[in-house]
Image (spheres, rainbow, N blue to C red):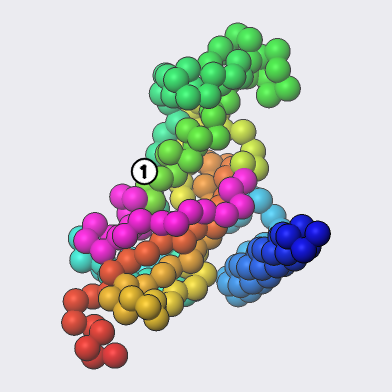
Amino acid sequence: MDLLLGIYILMSIVKFTRRMVRCFFETRINSLRKSRGVDPWKTTVKRRNMSNATLNVPVENRYFEDYFAGSVYELGAIAVEQDEMIAFARRFDPQVFHIDPESAKKTIYGGLIASGWHTAGLMMRLFSEHFLSKVASLGSPGVDELRWHKPVRPGDELSVRVTVVETKRSRSKPDRGIVHSFIEVINQNLDVVMSMKAVNFFYCRPGSQEKS
């Protein structure tokens, strides 16, 4: 009984912690988006011309110190090609609405749609190419709340918007820092088709720990 009670208490603590983390992210993201005139509950957004100031340090020389909470990065565009969609799905997600254009017409989607994992892969291409540092990125422990809001179809053009939610230097390893971000994938109609919360580790700029 004592063991079962201990397990129950531990699970309750984990659930409570996850709930608190989720509330923190949602509060922070909504605050940042409202400050920019964006309704946080809408999945259709207005495209804005972002200042180059948020991208003034190239990825070849970008370190933890170059990511600022509240900064918004819009990362290019990438086309959704039918042949790539089908090839990916046949290997990794062979559901009929991902691999067979004719059979897909009879499904609730009314036609071929991309695997959500293919969409995630397209997002990752832009994210790694334009947001992640080439010299300081240390990977990620994972993502939270990955959501596919709307189907992605052949011929769509996707762009990625990254909002930096929080940055903090590691206490145990002062040569690196942690960046929390909210990622949105947006189609040509300005609909958010995918979103997720990400955590990434970056090295600090060499010598910065001595100055701090």
Residue at the front extreme of this rendering: 1
**Helix, strand or loop for disc 1:** helix
Picture quadrant of residue 212? bottom left
Of the pair 40 and 62, the residue shown nearer to us: 62
- Circle 1: residue type: Arg
Residue 8 in view (yes/no) = no
Magenta-colored span = 128-147
Which percent across, then down, holds residue 102?
60, 9
> Can residue 28 be seen?
yes
Residue drawn at point x = 57 percent, y = 54 percent: 144
* Residue tagged 1: 125
Q: Give residue 152's quadrant in the image.
A: top right
**Residue visible at 28% across and 69% down in the picture:** 203
Residue 133 in magenta? yes
Q: Position of residue 54 (x, y in %)?
A: 37, 69
In the picture shown, does residue 105 fall above or below 57? above
> Is residue 77 highlighted in magenta?
no
Q: Where residue 172 sits in the image (x, y, percent)? A: 37, 78
Between residue 66 and residue 80, name the one nearer to us. 66
Above or below 151: residue 65: below
Q: Is residue 151 above or below residue 129?
A: above
Q: Is residue 194 above or below residue 48?
A: above
Left or right placement of residue 121 versus residue 184 in this view: left
Residue at 25% of width from left, 84% of height from top? Answer: 209
